[in-house]
Amino acid sequence: MLLVGAGAERLGKKRIIAETGAGQHGVATATVCALKGMECIVYMGEKDMERQAPNVARMKMLGATVIPATSGSKTLKDATNEAIRDWINNPGDTHYIIGGVVGPHPYPDMVARFQSVISEEMKSWQFFEKTGNNLPTHVIACVGGGSNAAGAFYHFLNEPSVQLIAVEAAGEGMSSGKTAATTQLGTPGILHGSKNLLMQTEDGQVVEPHSISAGLDYPGIGPLHAYLFESGRATFLSATDDEALAAAFELAKLEGIIPALESAHTLHALTMMKWVQEDIVIICLSGRGDKDLSTYMKHISL
Amino acid sequence: MNRIQKLFALKGRNILNIYCTAGYPHLESTIEIMKALQQYGADIIELGMPYSDPLADGPVIQRSSSIALANGMSIKKLFEQLKDFRRRPSSGSVGEAVRVILMGYMNSVLQYGFEKFCADAAAVGIDGLILPDFPEYEFEIEYGAIVNKYNLDFIFLITPETSDERIKKLDSLSSGFLYAVSSSYTTGSDKKPGSAKGYLRKLKSLRLKNPVLVGFGIKDKASFDAACQWAEGAIIGSAYIKSLENSPNVNAATKSFLSSKRGA
């Protein structure tokens, strides 16, 4: 992120804009802007600002202006619309730091490369020290737009022995009409400047998605993931809101880690696969759950 | 020579292009509005096909689009409404004179089927297409030939940020006219198009193949006249949609809106 900030500075840009779903990317952008003394505007769905209030507070504390997106389902897609419109209106002094592996070329490629630090770390000496192996057998990550999964998969794309597993948000269930499982329900379409898979009507109108997690609540999927799905290189699974909640509570009790709701979807995939003793599985726990405590508190049974 | 090219050849200056959203304010308003626009002096009608996520549009056209979609508008429905719109035996005819361009976003056109879309548009009497999120590269290698096959004009957009080299490229791929976005704005912006004078003057000096219409931010006689000093005409969108917003009678609203533009 620091590198991106420095790049924007070198381009002579004074103003940074970003879209955010769960607020993680917004906080990262606000952080680098604070450090660089740049103006920072983050677009965030109105609904997401409510359910991810701690991240909104962090962005504001870091000096960013958070502008609610009030159209559509008031979530990530709508925030991305507003960020793109802002950029169209301010092309001279503004740099758009996209968070998702979405948007027009070369954004999906750039974001995947930035996020590839995740799989670089997964392949490090620490992995070898812990397992005695150079490669895992499986890498699992959650996919909304798909940035953390793109980063987690990146350095394993050409390692055919490594199974890549992407987990989407099924929301209230695949046939509930309230879901974000793009690969299961989507068809080829164009959203935010790239052709990918898209949840849409027969007339090509975008269907509003739903997920309990703001970061996965997106009707499209990055073009890299659309390709991994269609080529079969990655396996796509999905977890419902309830399954994600249950997985989050289980991880907290078993390991003492409170995961982000997005990452909780990833954990549920563990119950959907058949494992053998020799499997070495890396789960990308892409965020911590502090930001989701208000949602967890609604569902906690003490 | 296509019909849009003929219009420019015959009239040359002060071309008035008015945007309206199909299916707005009511599902069945489309033809009535087109008739009124033709009657009160529009040279070109830019008929917007509503889309759920119109990235190039500001709040006014976004709102008209979502209302039109809620009314049940779709491309299929629109072609049904447009069937024989130029030569209807009853009073429903829009007539031959006015040029009609369909404006929309690629995704809904792709789902309809690009070639089928062009064929159906040509069959009902559409003259041209504007698809602002259509990349030039794909147009050149694949889709341009289909547009040409059906004898439709295709209009690309340029902005003050577009390089001279790219302007020339988009000019060579366009026919009918070139759409010069007055500044780098989404539609309905309040920024003054006057600030774009240098850019419009530059366009003159590039000796483009196509005439130029200026759009985005044109809302009254003053901004229309200012644009016409440097270009062959201008496009009005959000301001017209706004005038329809609270009006029970689209014909009367169109009459009063257009008489103020033409200074009549």
Image (spheres, grey):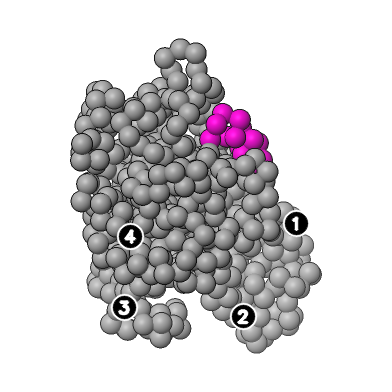
Discs 2, 3 touching: Cβ within 8 Å: no
**Number of the front mark, 4 or 3:** 4
Query: For the residue marked with disc 2, what is the amino acid?
Result: Glu
Residue highlighted by disc 3: A14
Query: For the residue marked with disc 4, what is the amino acid?
Result: Trp
Residue range corresponding to the magenta coloring: B113-126
Q: Quadrant of the N terminus of chain A?
A: bottom left
Tell me, yes or no, if residue B32 can be seen here.
Answer: yes
The image quadrant that residue B137 belongs to is bottom right
Give me the chain letter of mark 2. Answer: A
Residue highlighted by disc 4: B230
- Point out the tag, 1 or 3, that comes first from the N-terminus: 3
Q: Position of residue A237 (x, y in %)?
A: 64, 51
Q: CA distance from mark 1 to mark 3?
A: 42 Å
The circle drawn on residue A120 is 2
> Circle 1 sits in a helix, a strand or a loop, which is it?
loop
Same chain, labels 2 and 3: yes
Tell me, yes or no, if residue A191 can be seen here.
Answer: no
Q: Position of residue A163 (x, y in %)?
A: 73, 64
The image quadrant that residue B203 belongs to is bottom left
**Number of the front mark, 4 or 2:** 4
Discs 1, 3 touching: Cβ within 8 Å: no
Q: Residue at x 49, y 25 (%)?
A: B86
Q: Nearer the viewer, residue A187 or A240?
A: A187
Residue highlighted by disc 1: A232
